[in-house]
């Protein structure tokens, strides 16, 4: 099926440069959109549109694809999530991030906009203002709070359920009904625990609350209905596991919980509040549930998507109509991941996302009655999955026997043996994982002739709490050893040329790259760190992590004791590094302040290590602007080529739309 852009735009690249070099513009172009959802009647689409330093929202008619409304936030602000409340009103959750690699930090602001672009108004959040002089009634409260969607309340045309939290350290939250036209709010429940999330039943009644104080010990509470007392049903401090509610069965008699296990992946269980009986419904042998599958047009959980070596789905009832529909879609899009992201309220029309390691993603509308799928839009219509690099799952064991999983991306058409290789650890390092989906950097590096190794070292999520906890306070220790072991495995398997391996990463990945060449100076030929952290003790005094109420607990429990971190900081190990290094950072980076990189550069120069640097005072945690991104990846490819012999970048100019 032909892949095309919804708006029918064709982009042509004006290219010059030597044959065989990498065309950066092919990889640095932003996706046409990020997410897309169908309206309750199926008459409209809403889609988030990534721009240079913000993310907007576009609203289109399904019938002809015509743009009828849009929302563009200020610089560094992003339409992070959105929901159709009814066919004429969309609720947008805003976020900020200062850098392309930064995790969006939700601001707790909810913005309402009509499908035609009219009546755009901030309904709740710290920037809400009164409607001006001359009015006695002010439906919107002007206060320093953050709000997040809980439930769209399908049976209420203009009200949704939101959680509201004041701006304070580890606050108590409340659940409130929000009028999406006026901004008026009514409190329906108050949480019994700090930093709580809520889950409602099919009637919109808040029934669960789970949260944690600054000690980060999670507690789950349940109540029988509105006005009933909260009862704690799980205390992580006692059970040593976290439990979170997912929703209720159609008849409301059973609740579904996501439950951590002492070892192995998380499970989904049913829980009967009347009898306290629990029954395991889903457990994968390797990975956690990545997304919950809901019955079309409802908030009833019916299954889960798992992102392991290959994406797979499982259902509570494999004989159900939803399960049969899923299997038919998977067969139609053979080998690719398939997930229904939204649907019309009657369940007839389903928005289906399809993706793979070679395909950034296509969205189709599937008519469940006509049994017909129509392509809506491709995230990156210029990417041809048939010519993109091949992504393959891998599995190995670390030196202590811990199973490790990851992916190798190889250049399309290569034999895949004894290639120069880039080891690319993900950032985070915790609560993040590599899932084998299309990755721009991996594809770019493969186009330059490299095999790219990504491994979910201990500390990564998706493989159960024990696997994540095994990375606690192991910066420079067992987490680093996992990367070393995976690198040596790739050499032993004949994937990598043992004399041509570099390590490259961003944020924590930058830290791991510099620690890699410090701990294993004979294993790697070079290292590159992008917006990395290299002087761990100063994480307690600089950056945005320690500013949060629970941030110091996180640093202490997950990174390590401040007094011991100097010994595993690359800035103090520069004399062990014997290979060239490339460093890049932004002056406005709050997650990994530029001070880390400047200190690392100074230490390397003092030790006589060849070091190249690239700084942009106006960039944050990852570079936003197109000229800066272009220069960064041009320099990165040139740096890697000097050590590994891969291709460099063409000198390209982006075409005008």
Image (tube, helix red, strand yellow):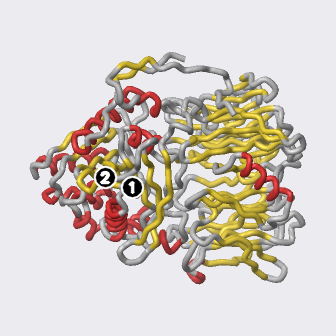
Badge 2: how crowded within 10 Å, few (<14), some, or many (20+)?
Answer: many
Q: Nearer the viewer, residue 4 or 94?
A: 4
Residue at 75% in and 79% down: 279
Whichever of callouts 2 and 1 sits on the residue coming sooner in the sequence is 1
Residue 440 seen anywhere in this rendered image of the structure:
yes
Q: Nearer the viewer, residue 172 or 231?
A: 231
- Contact (CB < 8 A) between labels 2 and 1? yes
**Residue named by callout 2:** 503
Q: Which quadrant of the structure image shows residue 326?
A: bottom right
Above or below 564: residue 572: above
Provide residue 446's location: percent of width, then percent of height.
40, 42
Q: Nearer the viewer, residue 176 or 576?
A: 576
Provide residue 119's location: percent of width, then percent of height.
74, 28
Provide residue 247's location: percent of width, then percent of height.
76, 63
Tag 1 secondary structure: loop
Residue 305 in the figure: left or right of residue 603: right
Tag 2 secondary structure: strand
**Residue named by callout 1:** 425
Above or below 461: residue 614: above
Q: Residue furthest front?
A: 415
| Quadrant holding the N terminus | top right
Above or below 20: residue 242: below
Residue 4 in the figure: left or right of residue 270: left
CA gap between label 2 and label 1 equals 8 Å
């Amino acid at each position: 099926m032909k892949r095309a852009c919804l708006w029918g735009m064709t982009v042509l690249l004006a290219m010059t440069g030597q044959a065989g070099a990498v065309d950066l513009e092919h990889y640095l172009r932003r996706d046409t959109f990020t997410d897309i959802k169908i309206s309750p009647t199926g008459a409209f689409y809403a889609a988030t549109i990534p721009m240079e330093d913000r993310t907007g929202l576009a609203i289109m008619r399904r019938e002809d694809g015509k743009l009828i409304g849009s929302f563009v936030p200020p610089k560094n602000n992003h339409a992070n999530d959105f929901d159709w409340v009814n066919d004429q009103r969309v609720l947008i959750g805003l976020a900020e991030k200062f850098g392309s690699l930064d995790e969006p930090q939700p601001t707790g602001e909810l913005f309402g906009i009509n499908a035609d672009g009219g009546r755009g108004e901030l309904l709740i959040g710290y920037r809400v203002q009164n409607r001006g002089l001359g009015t006695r009634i002010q439906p919107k409260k002007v206060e320093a709070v953050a709000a997040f969607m809980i439930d769209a309340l399908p049976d209420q045309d203009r009200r949704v359920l939101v959680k509201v939290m004041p701006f304070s350290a580890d606050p108590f939250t409340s659940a409130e009904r929000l009028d999406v036209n006026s901004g008026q709010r009514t409190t329906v429940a108050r949480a019994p625990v700090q930093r709580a999330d809520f889950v409602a039943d099919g009637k919109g009644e808040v029934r669960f609350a789970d949260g944690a104080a600054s000690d980060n010990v999670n507690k789950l509470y349940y109540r029988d209905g509105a006005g009933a007392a909260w009862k704690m049903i799980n205390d992580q401090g006692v059970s040593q596991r976290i439990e979170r509610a997912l929703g209720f069965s159609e008849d409301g008699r059973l609740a579904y919980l996501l439950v951590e296990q002492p070892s192995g992946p998380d499970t989904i269980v049913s829980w009967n509040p009347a009898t306290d009986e629990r029954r395991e419904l889903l457990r994968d042998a390797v990975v956690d549930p990545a997304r919950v599958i809901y019955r079309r047009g409802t908030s009833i959980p019916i299954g889960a998507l798992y992102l392991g070596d290959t994406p797979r789905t499982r259902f509570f009832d494999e004989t159900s109509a939803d399960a049969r529909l899923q299997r038919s879609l998977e067969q139609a899009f053979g080998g690719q991941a398939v997930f229904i992201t939204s649907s019309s309220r009657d369940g007839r029309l389903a928005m289906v996302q399809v993706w793979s390691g070679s395909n950034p993603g296509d969205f189709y509308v599937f008519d469940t009655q006509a049994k017909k799928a129509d392509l809506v839009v491709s995230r990156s219509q210029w990417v041809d999955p048939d010519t993109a690099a091949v992504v393959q799952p891998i599995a190995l064991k670390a030196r202590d026997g811990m199973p490790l999983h990851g992916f190798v991306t190889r250049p399309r058409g290569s034999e895949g043996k004894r290639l120069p290789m880039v080891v690319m650890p993900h950032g985070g390092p915790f609560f993040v994982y590599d899932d084998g989906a299309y990755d721009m950097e991996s594809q770019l590096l493969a186009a330059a002739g490299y095999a790219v190794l990504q491994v979910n070292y201990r500390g990564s999520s998706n493989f159960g709490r024990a696997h994540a906890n095994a990375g606690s306070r192991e910066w420079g220790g067992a987490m680093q050893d996992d990367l070393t072991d995976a690198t040596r495995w790739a050499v032993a398997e004949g994937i990598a040329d043992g004399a041509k391996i570099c390590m490259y990463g961003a944020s924590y990945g930058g830290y791991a790259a510099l620690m890699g060449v410090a701990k294993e100076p004979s294993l790697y030929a070079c290292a590159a760190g992008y917006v990395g952290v290299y002087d761990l003790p100063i994480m307690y005094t600089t950056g945005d992590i320690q500013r949060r109420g629970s941030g110091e607990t996180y640093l202490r429990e997950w990174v390590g004791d401040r007094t011991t971190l100097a010994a595993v900081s690359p800035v103090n190990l520069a004399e062990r590094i014997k290979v060239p290094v490339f460093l890049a950072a932004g002056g406005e980076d709050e997650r990994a302040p530029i001070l880390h990189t400047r200190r690392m550069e100074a230490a390397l120069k003092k030790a006589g290590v060849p070091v190249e640097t690239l700084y942009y005072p106006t960039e944050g945690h990852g570079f936003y602007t197109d000229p800066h991104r272009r220069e960064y990846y041009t320099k990165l490819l040139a740096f890697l080529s000097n050590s590994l012999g891969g291709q460099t970048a063409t000198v390209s100019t982006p075409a005008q739309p």
